[in-house]
Image (spheres, rainbow, N blue to C red):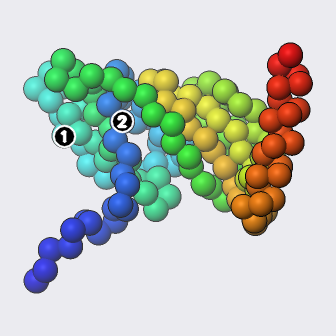
Amino acid sequence: MKTEPIPKGYHTVTPGLTVKGADKVIEFLKRAFDATELSRIARADGGVMHAELKIGDSIVMVCEASELCKPTTASLYLYVNDADTVYRRAVQAGGVSQMELGDQFWGDRGGSVTDPAGNQWWIATHIEDLSAAEIEKRGQAWMQEYFKKAA
């Protein structure tokens, strides 16, 4: 039997979060995104050496930062069926709103929150199929409006 180079259930890119407070991040992922904890390996001190959670059809790995593995932050883009509901649930679960939910120029409805470790989670539902040219046109208009407000 041939061993597949990408294990069953994984994708080519699988995010791994190295955080301070892995237990809090894991609980946030469960409450905010209905994550299912697939596995957890504890360190001798009780911290999380490695955990895997399934969110939708993707696996996210989480480990507790240490002297060997320094904490990092990431920005992750999460597609869901109902961005409004999931965004509200993420805020209720302790996420801090970074960008209010709204219709975006690239055809998604979304917004972002940060988790207890500072990782940014973009929560989105795709609502409109657009050509690259239309996204470019809308993006240029958005930037003009953004910089006008910033001035």
Q: Secondary structure at mark 2?
A: strand
**Image point (51%, 42%), residue name:** 76
Q: Which residue is mark 2?
A: 17
The answer to whether residue 55 is above or below residue 115 is below
Q: Amino acid at mark 2?
A: Leu
**Image point (36%, 36%), residue name:** 17
Mark yes or no: residue 82 visible. Answer: no
Quadrant position of the C terminus in the picture: top right
Left or right for 49, reference 29: left
Q: Which residue is mark 1?
A: 41
The answer to whether residue 24 is above or below residue 109 is above
The answer to whether residue 86 is above or below residue 93 is below
**Which residue extends farthest bottom?**
1
Q: Position of residue 35 (x, y in %)?
A: 46, 48
Quadrant position of the N terminus in the picture: bottom left
Calculate the distance from the C-alpha at mark 2 to the C-alpha at mark 1: 15 Å
Which quadrant holds residue 9? bottom left
Q: Amino acid at mark 1?
A: Ile
Q: Position of residue 114 (x, y in %)?
A: 56, 28
